[in-house]
Image (tube, helix red, strand yellow):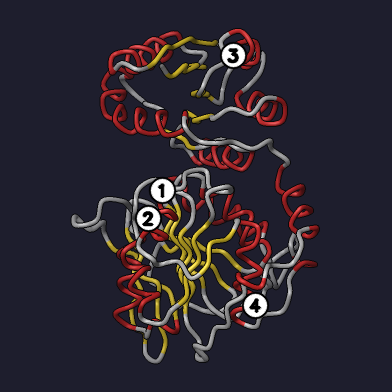
Amino acid sequence: MIRALVADDSALMRRHLTQLLEAVGGFTVQTARNGVEVLEALQSFDPHVITLDVNMPEMDGITCLSRIMSEDPRPVVMVSSLTEEGAETTLQALSLGAVDFVQKPGGTISLSIDRIHRELLLKVRSAATTRVRRSTGLRGRLAAQRRRPALPPSARVSFTGGRPGLVLVGVSTGGPGVLEDILPRLPADFPWPILVAQHMPSSFTGVFARRLNDLCAVSVVEVARQMPVEPGTVYIAKGDADLVVTRRGIGYSATPLPQSDTHIWHPSVARMVESALALLPANRLIALQLTGMGDDGAEAMARLRAGGGLTIAQDEETSVVFGMPQELIKRGGASVVLPSDAIAEQLIEWLGAPEAGALAGGRRRGT
């Protein structure tokens, strides 16, 4: 049985979430009204997974999460509103170590719960089996990266694509924290554009792009309209849509399109990689398959590698959910398998970019 702790200051919400989990079987549920009760339940109930509201009296969700991840780490799924403020708080929670989030029902709660129950059950079950690490925050992670020894020779692969190309990144559950491990390590003059398909709703991707832009030396933007791709820039796919590569004169553009009915997850990693392969030779592409559930993009990235491109699969130890990287590895599609804190260095080496250690916590260019 999975022991699930449901934390919310709304008695109605606690009751609905409890009924939802208990109705499917396999869960033992206890509830908490605030962060203080959550911390007490860590010892008395010892939950496998926690659903955590943000706005609670006595101790709010973010303060409670910080305590959990620093003192007694457990998988936490945030229950978040769709407002911009809610998105910012949720991204802060993911950076602190929350595994995932679900959108908080609005309006008539009983009807809204019905709409999100499948997502909630999937994410709570998945979170209950994940490994979580004690949170050190972004500053601590960057300090650890600077102390990390050099990559072993087996991880060093020479890239001979020559002409400019694209870096394509697929990521889902656990992605915000992992991207904060990788992107701030890149220099402002990183030589290739980077396109990111992060499974995330549209109300979150703009806030996420702005948050990353404040942390990185490279520029980070949300692709809400067609835009030419340029070196030193990271393009975050707009949520609830797909991002594809299109031709623009002698260059290329990042173009948002409505969700494809033939792809399960959105923004679709597979569709992004397939569009790049249709326009560029594989040896001008590098693909990263990072933490997440499912297999989105694995087949396309395996074809990319078979055609002469390079790929990186995030390792199991640093993945919140190993599904997506594992699927790439199973298909023989990973050039290298690396921990998240070694990926930026590998990209820098492959592309001959300057080291960026001094820029890890710095501002982007032009500021």
Write the residue at 23% across / 58% down: 260
- Dot 2: few (<14), some (14–19), or many (≥20) neighbours within 10 Å? many
Q: Is mark 4 on a helix, strand or loop?
A: helix
Quadrant position of the C terminus in the picture:
bottom right
Q: Nearer the viewer, mark 3 or mark 2?
A: 2
Residue placed most toward the observer, 315 or 51:
315
- Sequence-wise, which precedes: disc 3 or disc 2? 3
Which one is in front in this view, the residue at disc 3 or the one at disc 4?
4
Q: Quadrant for residue 365, please give it.
A: bottom right
Front tag of 1 and 3: 1
Q: Which quadrant, please, contains the N terminus?
A: top left
| CA separation in Å, label 1 and label 2 | 6 Å
Q: Are marks 4 and 2 in contact (CB under 8 Å)?
A: no
From the image, state whether disc 4 or disc 2 is nearer to you. Answer: 2
- Residue 327: image tag: 2
Q: What element carries label 2?
A: helix
Residue ID at (50%, 66%) = 312
Q: Which of 257 and 29 is in front in this view?
A: 29
Residue that numbered label 4 is attached to: 349
Q: Which type of secondary structure does the marked residue at label 1 adopt?
A: helix
The outermost residue toward the front is 154
**Residue 304 picture location, percent across and down:** 37, 75
Q: Which of marks 4 and 2 is nearer the N terminus?
A: 2
Q: Is 74 rendered above or below residue 267?
A: above
Q: Which of 367 and 176 is in front in this view?
A: 176
Question: Is the residue marked by circle 4 packed among few (<14), some (14-19), or many (20+) residues within 10 Å?
Answer: some
The residue that mark 1 highlights is 323
